[in-house]
Image (cartoon, coloured by chain):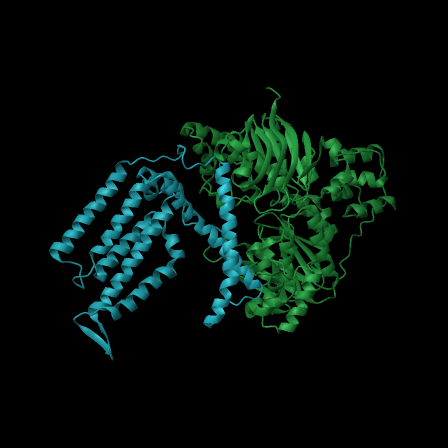
Chain colours: A cyan, B green
Amino acid sequence: MNLSLYRDEDTWLHRLDSRTKMIGVMIIFVLCLCFNHPLYMAGMASAMFAIAVSSRAHPVLWNLRHILILLILFSSVLWPFFIKGPTTVWTWKTLAVSRESLLYGIAMGLRLATFVMAGLVFLATTRNEEITGGLIRMGLPYPIAFALVTALRLVPTFAGAGATIVQAQVSRGLDLESKNIFGRLAAFIPLAVPMFITAIRYTNLLSMALESRGFSPVTPRTMYYVSKMGKKDWGALMALIFFLAVFLYLRLVCGAGVVMPGRL
Amino acid sequence: MNMGISVSFEDVSYTYHNGDIPALQHISGDIKDGSFVVMMGHGGAGKSSLCFAVNGLIPRFYRGKYSGRLTVGGRDVSQTSIADLAKTVGLVFQDFEAQLFSTNVELEMAFGPENQGISREGIGKRIDRYLRFVGLEGMQRRDTATLSGGQKQRLAIGSVLAMEPSVLVMDEPTTDLDPYGRERILSLSEELKNHERTLILIDHEPDAAVGADEIWLLRNGQLAAQGTPGKILTDTALLESCGIKALPTLALFSAMGWPWQPLTLEEAIFLISKHDLAPRRKSGMDGNRRKSSNRHVVLEAKDLSFRYPETSADVLQGVNLTVREGEFVAILGQNGSGKSTLARQFNGLLKPTSGEMLVQAKATTSLKHRELARLVGYVFQNPDHQIFASSVREEAGFGLRVLGEDPGRIKIRVEEALAATGLAGYEERSPFLLTKGERQRVAVASILAAKPAVLILDEPTTGLDYRHQRDAMEMLKSLNRIGHTIIVITHAIWIAETYADRTIVMKDGRIIMDGPTREVFRDETRLGETSLSPSPIVRLSNRLSMNALTLNDLVEELKS
């Protein structure tokens, strides 16, 4: 089974330079921080989803839908207990929930979901090697860029090994469905030790394989995939910066999109 | 081309940092430019250490006690960095999963040349050239994770060749491959000979060495012998002493007292017909009858189909299967044919998408994992995926402990299981410090202790040398004799032939052959559809219309 997030398609987002996408994700993060009204955030989330569909990254979101839904739910349920708004709708002893705090909770849930979606869409449309290349072009030293991206690359590998380890131990009768906390803790060691050993063995082999293929952090190397910042890249960045300016104007000058004044 | 010396060993000895006995002892010898050398030996004989020494991983990556001088292309290995040496020596590892790290085929190929600082155009040319050489042309954009095992290993070879090293070292590149994948790799090594590249191949099957210029035999870290295939492979006693199975054709001819020494099956068949060694006989094709038709059914799959959630393709399609108590079943098929997926249905790790899987007449969907663990034991391919305890006793007793058995009973069961797996006396040892073969046994013992009615083993012999493979299989055979039902998933054909009463062949998620082992291996055309073929002995036996599945049986049958 393939656990990697990358989807090999040829869409407008795949063709953008990885630097554009990295900066773009950061701008989207800031855009998300501009408003805390659920309707505005719903608009942002829908826009992000539209981008995902247009770059055929939506299957990745679909596979992780449970996490996205949980994020929204948790945030909507928990936030109202921690902040107070003027219009109280429900009280119980010292707890009070207001209409504004409820709306704020939903907005925060959507904001988190949009963050996660942006990250996932980035990983679904950008190869590890392109990220390495982009990071180097942005001035990061090669060994650091390579290490960062290799860590990313190892996630699916270790997830796969982890799944096998769980299966192997469940086959021996390990009870992962146990309800009590001690049962859960007892189940931890038979899973953690083999995981640890497997990870060490694997990374050891990987570093041997890298060195045997002439990998050396200090000597200069060439890149087979070279991408340039083209018109489309500058266009995409300009568009995002334009949105950023408009959003900041709306929030700071017009005071739009706010249910909780004084909060991000 | 000059026939100079490519690799030269001058009294090379090496001891690993935490090892007490040397892994290599006083190795001396020369490998000529452009020659093809096969290194053979038992597990732990020092084959991998020798590879690592040629490539500089020893002593640069593995620090330890190193003496002597090893030069490659005139350069002293111990004085050169591994990355520098990579321009001259390419190394292909046994484990094809860990040596591929790029996201698609062409980037994997490009990685080495990129490190060498070659221009984009130059890299593109090399990618085309060497992908064609390893037979992966047109797959440039494929995600490496979607390749089959054989393709992955060929990509690994291609990606090393793309660096155009003058010496290519392959460390057991075929052990995790099905027979078809193995054959492709071996034919590549034959072709490489024509490319004026020195090739060093490690393998423990003698057929890989037939086309070599020279064979080096290793035993306990020492060079036991070196010479041409004609000289080394015909010395059966020497091979046996190094833990190598003799070439089946040679073993047959010497057992029959026939005075020729054929190295290949074709040669053997030619000699037999030329000298009329095996006169035609009335073909008594009775085969081995299945003796267990009235025993209890332990496993039954009814129209079983399965697909992973979130995917659209069925991994198993309409499988119907009955396994009875006391059977010894081998499941064969190419990598990705659904063997492991089917076996994971047997113990409920995976549940059918449609159809039914019954264990002792109860559907796996109605049973808990804990209950199933007592009925069906499953030994995973890699023992390191399950070993965690600090002693063998604790490891073997883990299953019983979590199943809530009382300590007295656990002690007895564990002792029985350790005795059955030949691990008596190992109780207090740490499983992490045992050899691969011993760890495999610990894994079997830990499953066996729960006394499951059915024992499933996923590739129980990978990574073991011939001697340990035979030991492991003999152990299973004796468990089978005392009543355990054994199911072995394997790509080692000879294991199915020698030990299984019944063989199941899978392809694309379906069972395409299922019957007594002898019958299955008689149908070579059908087997060929799945890229499998019987071992040389059985092919010979088929050719002579005989029933033998093993060398001893064939000798007996010929003499009768």
- Number of callouts in the render? 0
| Residue A11 visible in the shown view | yes
Q: Nearer the viewer, residue B345 or B98?
A: B98
Instruction: Give percent across and percent down for residue B285.
Output: 80, 49
Q: Nearer the viewer, residue A69 or A92?
A: A92
Q: Is residue A54 left or right of residue B331?
A: left
Instruction: Give percent across and percent down for residue A102.
Output: 24, 68
Residue at the far right: name it: B560
The residue lying at 29 percent from left, 36 percent from top is: A229
Q: Nearer the viewer, residue A255 or B30?
A: B30
**Which quadrant does the C terminus of chain A fall into?**
bottom left
Residue at the far bottom: name it: A93
The residue lying at 66 percent from left, 35 percent from top is: B26
| Residue B162 visible in the shown view | no
Instruction: Give percent across and percent down for residue A241.
Output: 21, 45
Residue at the far top: name it: B1
Instruction: Give percent across and percent down for residue B41.
Output: 68, 41
